Image (cartoon, rainbow, N blue to C red):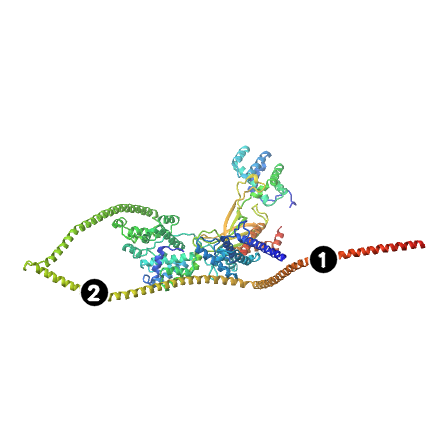
Amino acid sequence: MIPRTICGNVDVQQNSSDMEEVDKIIIHSLRQVGCDIEDEIESLQQFTTELVVEATVRCLRVIQPGLTLPVSLPSSMSARFRIGAEIAQVCSDLGYGGDVGYQTFLYSSVTDIRKVLIFLIEKLPKESEKVVEVPSGKAALLQQSLSDLLRKQFNTPWIPNYCKNKGIRWFKDGSWSREGYLHCHQFYSCPLVVPPVTTKKLEITEKSKDYYKMHTPYITEQIKNSNELVPSLIQLNANSLTLEQLHSEKDSSVLMKPWLPSLEKTSKLMSSKDEPLEPYARSLVGLSGKKPIPRPRPPPKPKHLTEETPSPPKSTEEVPADKEKTHDEEEKDSEKSIENLKQKMEDMKISFEDLRNEVKTLKVKASQAMEELREEEKPCQEVEERLALWRRTQEILPRPGSDGLAGEGVERLKSMADGSARRLLSLASAWDEHRTALLSEYRHLREHDTNRTSEAQRQAELLRSLREKTREVMEEVREKEQIRKQLTTEREKVNKDVGRSAYTRRIMEIIGNIRKQNEDIDKVLKDTKEVQKEINQLTGRLDRSFTVADELIFRIQTEEAKSVASNLERITADLRQMRQESAALAARLERKS
Amino acid sequence: MEISNQVSEGLKVLGSPSKIDDDLFRSYLEAAVISLSSAEKMSEIKINSTAEVDGKVAYASLLVVMVEAARHDVDSTSLASILEEKRFDPPRLDKVLKLYSVVKHKLQAQLSGIGSFPPHVVDATWKLDYVIKSDNLEYKSGPQYLVNLLTEVPGGGEKKIQFACTMEEMQDLVGKLREAAKLMEKVANV
Amino acid sequence: MSGLPRTMQLFLTDSHKQHLELVSKQDISVFREVCQIALDFVRNGPNLKAIVALSQEIEVPPQSLRLAIEGLIKLLIESFKNKLSSEDFTGSLQALGFREEQQDLLTKLYTEEGKILNVVGGSVTPPHFHNLDWRFEVQVASRSLLHQLTPLITMKLSLKDGETAPKGKESDSDSGAKKPSLQDHILQIDPVGLLHITGILEQALAEGSSRHCRRVQHSLE
């Protein structure tokens, strides 16, 4: 019995030291994967929940590049559960056979975690595989598409530059690459005038509408140099975006403004290049000449404007023609007129301010007057009410023409009261009738209504969910499409090197062999363990037999020792006798000789 | 991709048949094809210029959204969802998407050529001379290459860069070029 | 080439010979000074003051002295261009009527200071290849196209200007008195173009060491 217990103790020790070994290997592998595990931590028992999650996620990321699980747990509980569940899902997707759920990671037991981590670490790609592994991530994707592009380019022959259409080489699949830069040009834009959209909120004045309708050219006609169209369009969008951001709080007011790039910008543009001047000049002259100031309200004294700059709209067309000759003069003139206009505008602003103030004070006065009026009317109403009451009492009271007896008056009052009481009763009964009917109808209708609302709500809910689903499905379709594309390209690539399948086959064979060998090793291990067990049993048996044998031998020895002593005495006696005999014989021999 | 409110408003106008009739819509599409894919023919575009004010906004918005979509490399489904938001009339939406598919690549090619670029080498020619005597004392007698690099200067036509080099210098030059070419072939075969 | 010593190996115009006569007439001390001025001329450009001073000393018009000095320089340059050995050079000097002392002095000048002339010579020739730096870059975005992938090779081609630098430093006269003025060209090329011009220039290189070329070269040496 004793040896057996000793044997068991040894077993347990060996087990725990094994586990320590395993933990060390696991921690080593985790550090290689990129986990930040402190040096003090030597076994999985010391792992915190955060560390467990980090370790698992890092492993999963290496196994499945492109996984978007976070390495650290968020603080909110529900998010933690979600992440735990996701990790568990990924693990079981990878083929983890054991029981796994969010509790495995969030409320971890060491044995479960160990199992999971061992599984994951086995799944980690080996060094040799890493080389073959298709790199992922944005940089790698970029590299991949770059090499694809270069390959595509290298597969095409060189073409002399004069054979290319504007320096662009078109591939069969519709893509292109730029090989010539003769037709390239800088980002020159010119300001474009686009009328504002008329909405309910925003009404443009008839005159500016006229201007936009009759005199604003289409944007493609505002461009002088065809190279400037695209930059101008980009600039247009950028400008109006910036403008909207600046005025985002007064959104509606922006909508009222026409599309014009800010003045500073245009002047800068004009100084660098003079082609874009024409549309600008046109719009300027248009401003002064036709007063199409795109505001919802016309300026208070529009006459000033038209009087000051009496250039007829037709002249706008002539301006660009003789622009070059009288360029400077015109510039000066326009500057002067701008100055004038500015001055006028300032004046007008001031008078406008004044008028507005006046209007304000008048409004205040008007409201005060209204208040007074109301005050005056109040006593008047009171008097009228009193008057009506008096009239009615006068009717009831005895008329001056009759006997003048109070009794008659009382009688009449009584009969009137009776009559009204009766009428009241009949009215009440009639009301009751109506009421019940109406009430029931009302109830019925209400029920109906609630039914309908709930129906409507249900429908709306359904609609919403359907919409959601559509969006999801769309998204899914898009994703699937993308995946399909990726897979097709991959497949094409795979098709190219035939050796790959052979290699895979060989790898598969090797894996099969290894699996077989693993099984063999397992078998041998099992055998060894059995033999070990047997040996342990036999050692016990041997120990026991040894003691028995020892005792036996001792017993036998003591018995034998006694007999030997007597034998020895006998033998010694015999010896002594023989010696005597031999001595006698020797003496006889001497005597004879 | 970001488009301003004004463009959005213009797109709403463009997408509603009640504001822009079908004929005008078609003429806008035609004009857009020309102005976006072959800008040099832009002067041939004829649109009824006394159209309603809304038409001018709608046309501008159409051009802006095409350019921005190409600039951001938006795919047609995303463009469709953007237009759907603007309550686009479905048949019109299809037409605009078709326009986009026609114009997109050309437009992107055009966009790629906007900017500042150094002269671009497009071709090379050479001549091998044997210098026997030279009034220029610098040149030793022996083989001498005369290399012409033909370059395209953006907006400035073609320009030749001519230089001479000896055998050794030519080896140096070719070695460096070969190194660059090798690198690129390596990158291509990653 | 030394079969005909003491004969003229150069073809000079009569006016050139005339100009030189003025120098050969001078005695040795003046002649030495003339040589000094000529040398200075080659290194640092004309020094009119020295010429005027000397012309007053020997009582000749400064213009003639200047022509004479320039003629002397021209003589040296021509001799170099024709690769005259020092004996041939001396022979030519003799044929031009220089006295023995003068011949010695000029020959010394020719053999010792000739290197300067060797480098300084200038004419209208294309610039010379000096260096090529390159880098491979991929343009991924620009203002007008936000998503793109444009592989390009940007090169800096440095060319040495063939023009004479008029004021070379004396100190680097050993390594070549001229300080080469470099002009850099920043160029770009697309991958296909790069392969193309590499191919073309490789072909040029191969042609340069072909048998045909070597035969031509051999026959010319």
Q: Is residue A277 above or below residue C28?
A: below
Work out whether residue A286 can be spotted: yes
Q: Residue at x 22, y 65 (%)?
A: A432
Q: Within 10 angstroms of label 2, few (less than 14), some, or many (20 or more) residues?
A: few
Task: Identify the image quadrant of residue B182.
Answer: bottom right
User: Residue A463, relative to residue C33: is it above or below?
Assistant: below
- The residue at the point 86 percent across, 56 percent down is A578
Chain-order first, disc 1 or disc 2: 2
| Image location of residue A198, percent across then percent down | 31, 57
1 or 2: mark nearer the eye = 1
Q: Nearer the viewer, residue B54 or B2?
A: B2
Dot 1: element: helix
- Density class for disc 1 (Cα within 10 Å; few <14, some 14-19, many ≥20) is few
Label 2 resides on the chain identified as: A
x, y (%) of residue A117?
53, 57
Question: In the shown orientation, is residue A191 left or right of residue C62?
Answer: left
| Three-letter amino acid code at the position of disc 1 | Arg
- The residue that disc 2 covers is A431
Spatial CA distance of label 1 from label 2 is 130 Å
Tell me which chain the residue with mark 1 is part of: A
* Label 1–label 2 contact, CB within 8 A: no
Locate the N terminus of chain B and report the quarter of the image it occupies. bottom left
How far across and down, in percent of the image, does residue A31 sit? Answer: 54, 52
**Residue topped by disc 1:** A555
Is B160 placed left or right of A542 in the picture?
left
Outermost residue toward the right?
A: A593
Q: Which of C102 and B117 lies nearest the eye of the viewer?
A: B117
